[in-house]
Image (spheres, rainbow, N blue to C red):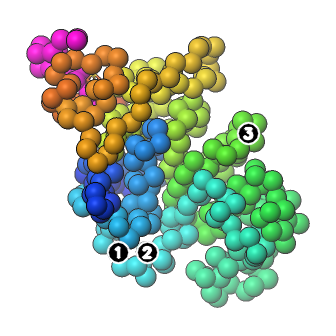
Amino acid sequence: MSQEELLKVEGLSVTYYGPPDVEAVHHASFDIKRGEIFGLAGESGCGKTTLIAALTRLLPDNGAVTAGSIAFAGADWLHMTPPEVDAWRWQKISLVSQSAMNSLNPVISVGDQIVDAILAHRPNTPKREAWERAEALLRMVEVDPKHVHSFAHELSGGMRQRVMIAMALALEPDLVVMDEPTTALDVVVQAQIIHQVRSLQERLGFSVIFVTHDMSLLLSIADRMAIMYAGEIVELGSRERLNRHAAHPYTRGLIDSFPSVFEKKSRVGIPGAPPSMVTPPPGCRFHLRCPERLSVCDVAVPEERVLDSGGHRVRCHLYSVDALRQGSHD
Ligand code: SF4
């Protein structure tokens, strides 16, 4: 593992056991650098949530990693025991989930919840110090510290999500996983929270995995990003590369599906829907929806190609010389 890498995922596959059995993530590989915001994008049902559940060791009982490895801060994360994982949770890795209303305990004040997390992991912390820390954390995410005694239902949606971010940062983790943290919020509050995540990350130096289906949001916040389709990472690259040179037709479709913060353009959706993961299509899994499909795409699984020295890579026959020779547009 290089010095810069915080997390390295190699060949990760995840299956939910049924019947029917469903492989929701297939052979995913990527790394997260220290201090970067790494985006993960794709439509609902493309495997983002499953990948995040595997990364946070929160797969449900019927889900299992069937192949691959995750090295986290130099440790074999997948083979750590449950007590070891519990000890690392909050301190090394924390999660901000989609719905703060569901994640916050409705009958315990937000301050008590932050203090509980601190004391559970650092039991020698004096209680008064833990409460001061809870207030400081609220201040850090620009929530009035008087709300330390408030309950979730007394806060607005934006404030609840800020409280979740404060909780996630309570024990200064190396990696914060943010699973669609702004999806339920209006665009103004969403922009404020994105700005805040970026400035906190720059100030405190933690890494972020930011999961969303909104490419324009990702292009405004992530340093690098991976695009998932039907359980596979189909493209990975820096924000600059994907913004100007998105290579996979699915990535380009996602970018065109959202209004841009950089330019005026009309929105074009991707026709159809992601395939069932019980029986994913043969060949390229995107071929039934792809506007640039070659005949080879229906039958041959595309290899991954590296497109530049910065690690921009894509899984698409358009970048395979052999396929271009054999294939023709239908
Ligand atoms: Fe489209 Fe073929 Fe590329 Fe798949 S491999 S994205 S079908 S061009």
Query: From the viewer's perspective, is the residue at label 3 or at label 2 nearer?
Result: 3
Q: Secondary structure at mark 1?
A: loop
Q: Position of residue 293 (x, y in %)?
A: 27, 19
Q: Position of residue 202 (x, y in %)?
A: 62, 47
Marks 3 and 2, how far apart at CA? 35 Å
**Foreground residue among 37 and 253:** 253
Number of the label disc, if any, that sits on residue 186: 3
The amino acid type found where label 1 is placed reads Met
Determine whether, in the image, residue 156 is placed left or right of residue 72: right
Task: Name the residue located 29 percent from the left edge and 54 percent from the top edge.
Answer: 22
Determine whether, in the image, residue 20 is placed left or right of residue 7: left
Q: Which residue is mark 1?
A: 80
The amino acid type found where label 3 is placed reads Asp
Q: Earlier in the sequence, mark 3 or mark 1?
A: 1
Q: Which residue is mark 2?
A: 85
Task: Name the residue located 23 percent from the left edge and 11 percent from the top edge.
Answer: 329
Marks 3 and 1, how far apart at CA? 39 Å
Image quadrant where residue 166 sits: bottom right
What are the residue bounds of the magenta stretch? Answer: 313-330
The amino acid type found where label 2 is placed reads Val
